[in-house]
Each structure stands twice: as structure tokens, then as C-alpha cells.
Amino acid sequence: MFRIDWQAEGLAAIEPTLDEVRAHADELAIGYNEPRNASLMGHTAALTPEEVIEHYADMADEGAHQFLLFTNGALAGDADLRGIADGAAEFAFMIGAPVAQGKGLGTKFATMIYAFAFDQLGLARVYASVIPANTASKRVFEKLGCVVDDSPAARAYADEPDDIVMAIDRATFAARNKPALTIQPR
């Protein structure tokens, strides 16, 4: 289990136990089911808290690293690194409350998780599958230094055939993003 903190900004990303997921499942379901979030994530049916818990359990069984995202101790959303293989993974995130979106939280949390991916997991490349209408997520990835990647390796991470896949390698991330992160085993 890992805990990633930016102490000065009150941000934390915690790799949760299933009990911690259960404790936040209602809030996560609300975030996933918020109409704008659901459409940008490609959800067509509402998720129950029980389905959120099942989703976390299934992803853990598949070897994903999942994180609950907190701002000053309050749940802000979640993120994960999934499909980890051959030095690469896919990254996905959600800032749940619409009032918290568009304020830089996605970029800050993505930076934290990407640093974890490259420094702690030793990944060489991270991909993100973005639906074309999700311009806010595309901007987050561009700020980090990600570029559109249409290679076969990148397209393998596309969630849907028309998704845009963005990617960044470790060297590019390190050159563009040198925040003071503290990554500690929990």
C-alpha cells in the first residue's frame, strides 16, 4: 500500500484497502453517476455502491494500482493505473464533484500518480484513453507532456475505438514535471 502526499497543498492519494473503498463507495458512486462525469467516462448505466466495491475488487485482482484522492481529508475522486504490462500501463482518473473540476486538481493528482508510476513501479510509458468530447482530461494530459499516440501499442489501451490515446514516457515526464513529491509506504 502506498500513500502519496503533497503536504503543502493538502492533497493525498491513498491506495485503499477494500474496507476503505467500502467506506467511500457511496461518495464514489455519486461521482461516477453525476451526469457529466458519466458521459465523459462512457458510463451508460448508473453504478450502485456495491458495483463500485466490486469494480475495485476486480481491478485489484487484475493487478491495478487504485487510489482514492483526497483534498484536505475530504474525498475528491479516484484514479488508477491498470493494464500494467511490459513497462506500461493505462491511467484513468475522476474528480467527482463538478464544483471541484476545472481548478487544477486533476493535473495535480495526475502528476502524483504518474510520478508513482515512473518512480515506484518503474514504468517506461503511461497511456490514457480519452473520449473525444472530454477536452478537460485532454488538457490535463497535455499539461503533463502527453501527446496523442496512434501506435498499435497505444491503441491497445483505447477503451473505445474512437477514443484518443495519449502517452508519455518516463524521460519526458521527468524533464517536464519536477514537483516535490513524497511517496511513502503506508
Image (cartoon, rainbow, N blue to C red):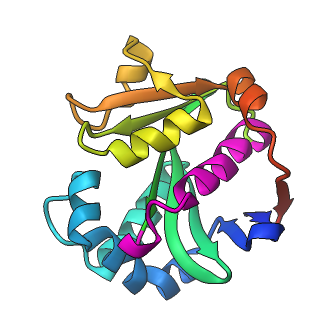
Q: Nearer the viewer, residue 9 or 64?
A: 9
The front one of 120 and 35 is 35
- Judging depth in this view, the residue of 20 and 36 nearest the camera is 36
Report x, y in % for residue 153. Answer: 44, 17
Q: How many marks?
A: 0
Depth check, front residue: 29 or 60: 29
Residue closest to the far top = 151
181 vs 38, left or right, is right
What is the quadrant of residue 84 in the picture?
Answer: top right
Based on the displayed image, in which of its 4 quarters is residue 74 positioned? bottom right
Residue 131 horizontal side relative to residue 64, left or right:
left
Measured as percent of width and height from the top left, residue 64 is found at 54, 50
Quadrant of the image containing the C terminus: bottom right
Judge whether residue 135 can be spotted in this image.
Answer: yes
Residue visible at 69% across and 52% down? Answer: 112
> x%, y% of residue 111?
66, 47
The chief SS type of the magenta part is: helix
Q: Residue at x 57, y 69 (%)?
A: 68
* Coordinates of residue 55 in the picture (x, y in percent): 38, 64
Quarter of the rendering occupied by the N terminus: bottom right
User: Magenta span covers which residues?
Assistant: 96-120
Q: Is residue 84 above or below residue 3?
A: above
Q: Is residue 48 left or right of residue 128?
A: left
- From this viewpoint, which residue is outermost toward the left? 44
Vertical placement of residue 157 versus 99, above or below = above
Q: Is residue 186 visible?
A: no
